Amino acid sequence: MSRTEVLIIGGGVTGLGTARDLAMRGVNVILMTASDVCSGASGRNHGMLHSGARYAVRDPEAAIECVSESKVLKSIANFCVEDTGGLFVHLPQDDPGFPGMFRRACASCGVGIEQLSTREALDMESALAPWFDEVLAVPDAVIDPMSLGLANAYMADRCGADIRTHHQVEDIDLMNGIVRYRDLTNGEVGELRPEVTVNAAGAWTAEVAGMADLHLNVTTSRGTLVVFEGRLVDRLVNRMRMPGDGDIFVPGVGTTVLGTTSSPASSGNDDLPTGAEVSALVEEARAMMPGVVAHRPIRAFTGVRALTPGGLGRDASRNFTIVDHGADMSMAMLSVVGGKLTTYRLMAERISDRIASILGNGSSCRTHLELLNDDDGDEIPEAHRARFCWQYGPMASEVWSSCQDRGAEEICSCQGVLRGEVEHFVGLGAGGMGEIARRTRAGMGYCQGTGCLLRLSSIIGPGAMEAISRERERGLLPVTMGVQMRQSAMRDCLMRVYGVRP
């Protein structure tokens, strides 16, 4: 039976960040996730690096954490951060007292704000509804969640952490200090005897705690977002009111994300977006940006968030809690609940500090000081360098080397993904369209895999074509409306030609 110091359950960015932090302190750590890294809420969000402004009025503690952590991430993860800035727009039909509250709350939390004139705001974002009555600029930014997560996984591995995807924990015996798991790739079972187990399973945190016969109160909330073709805004644009549905636009690489709904989730797997959610988001967003209805939605997706108890939906805090289940057993166990992508590093630091104390490890956290990317991409041709560095960070040169060895034929024309990129991750054990898409963005462009289906399936292997089609259609069906219906009709015809559909 294997012996290790720390087992982390959960492959989201918090678990990966904790693995990196602990490994940098010299701790022997294994991370297990039942699926792929960042396949839950960490890979299903709008990619907003919060300045703290969005939570300043309702959740000042979370806002203050965002203020400091957004500055840290702009420093250590600048390869996947676009420092766009953000706007908060107040409309005549919204609470007239909210702008005053908002300004005072931002000042109290340390969020920098700047008053803009109507002309200044429209010069920045011409698609805004011209009838707004106030606009404030804030230091929001865009961050690529998958690039951030993969960089943490890569750097944790390089520091000695053992990252195991498709490993499902099935039983936690605190009394005897045994964790039993199954390798889902081959069905083999195994046991570990960690000194400390960390439950960082996100929306499945309560279920993992239940394996140890522990009760953990967790609120789960599903949030659906819509991806539009093209960059409709250059900055993050928020509606200046209490956070609600359809009140934030986040610019991406050739896309714009509109979000987000908030409703109770039945489980961590309650992540299928609906047409009703998409329609409601678009209708609400028209008040701030009337022209949004003329743009083509190319996909919808849903993430399930684990929130600290004490409120439902948007009333729940976006702060985080670390629950110590006691160290009087043969194995200590900690659970982390809540938090945000922006504060993942702080969460990992707090967890790691607690574990270091349990283990008697005197090392201090260095994740706020050391860059997540030490690869400047000098070997990569200029035509590809910016994209490779943005997507792959510390892996950029390694992935480019695979393209030289395995071929630079373009596989996905929407995203410019090359054969060597796909084959690189297939060679590392990434299996299935979801994992390839998360790493390379193949199939995630305007046509949602329609054009690259055959080429991708020839690399991924038997059965891939149907799997790719099924995976993409999860997010396509809810946005089959307006101009997108033509794309869906063409896709349907191609699927019949390919034999994927009868």
Image (tube, helix red, strand yellow):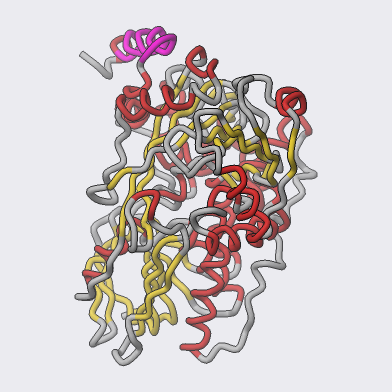
Q: Is residue 326 left or right of residue 121?
A: left
Q: Nearer the viewer, residue 337 or 21?
A: 337
Q: How many marks?
A: 0
Q: Is residue 493 magenta?
A: yes
Q: Is residue 56 left or right of residue 454?
A: right
Q: Nearer the viewer, residue 482 or 411?
A: 482
Q: Give the vertical position of 193 relative to 484 (above or below).
A: below
Residue 72 position in % (x across, y down): 68, 60
Residue positioned 73% across, 52% down in the render: 375
Q: Nearer the viewer, residue 388 or 408?
A: 388
Residue 207 position in % (x across, y down): 24, 63
Residue positioned 72% across, 68% down in the render: 369
Q: Nearer the viewer, residue 72 or 356?
A: 72
Residue 124 position in % (x across, y down): 73, 27
Q: Quadrant of residue 343?
A: bottom right
Most prominent secondary structure in the magenta stretch? helix
Residue 414 position in % (x across, y down): 56, 22
Q: Is residue 432 visible?
A: no
Q: Which residues are magenta?
A: 481-495
Residue positioned 38% across, 38% down in the render: 261
Q: Give the vertical position of 25 relative to 51 (above or below).
A: below
Q: Is residue 398 magenta?
A: no
Q: Give the vertical position of 443 relative to 202 (above or below).
A: above
Q: Quadrant of the C terminus?
A: top left
